[in-house]
Image (cartoon, rainbow, N blue to C red):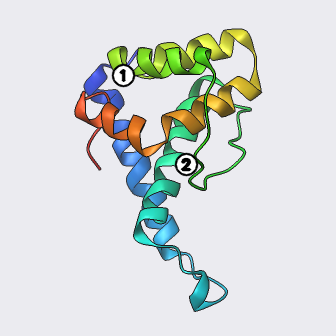
Amino acid sequence: MELSKEQQVAALKQKYEQELQAIQQEVPASPELVPTPEAQEHQAVSQATEGVIQEQMPSFKASSHEPISTEVSPQVQGMVTESLLNGPYKSIEAIQNANDSALADEYHRALTSNESWHALVKEGKIPEL
């Protein structure tokens, strides 16, 4: 059964909240290693996005949940644009069909960048968290 967009957004918001809560409850080895609230939020967004991708590609594992600023390929930029228009699920399906884990990781990094994430929220494709 395919979920409605509202159900998809609700599920993503719930995953995000669970990830953020788990991150905030982790006790760092040293007070100097306490991540900033922005870094905690990015990590939660990254982990929730990883979970969304894993729904269709169970073996996917993001290479990092740290904020990384990188250039993306034109193919991935097109997928991000598609995600802004129609939500991330069609792009994830295309990556799954390509069976390309590197492409999935690049898409994950691009999708969790602040600019893309905020655009998805603004367009109502994912909830404002």
Q: Which residue is outermost to the bottom? A: 31
Q: Position of residue 69 (x, y in %)?
A: 57, 46
**Residue at horizontal 57 percent and vertical 90 percent from the top:** 31
Report the number of numbered marks. Answer: 2
Vertical placement of 51 versus 43: above or below? above
Residue 83's spot in the image, x, y percent? 42, 20
Identified at 47% across, 22% down, the residue is 80
Question: In this orientation, does residue 93 appear?
Answer: yes
Is residue 126 shown to the viewer in this render? no
Identify the residue at horizontal 29%, vertical 50% (top origin): 129
The answer to whether 68 appears left or right of 99 in the picture is left
**Quadrant location of the N terminus?**
top left
Asked if disc 2 and disc 1 are in contact, CB closer than 8 Å, the reply is no
Quadrant in the rendering for residue 87: top left
Q: Is residue 72 left or right of residue 7?
A: right
Disc 1 marks which residue?
84
Q: Residue at x 59, y 16 (%)?
A: 74
Q: In the rendered structure, which amino acid carries the disc numbered 2?
A: Gln
Q: Position of residue 120 (x, y in %)?
A: 33, 31
Name which residue type carries label 1.
Answer: Leu
The label number, if any, that marks residue 47 in the structure image: 2
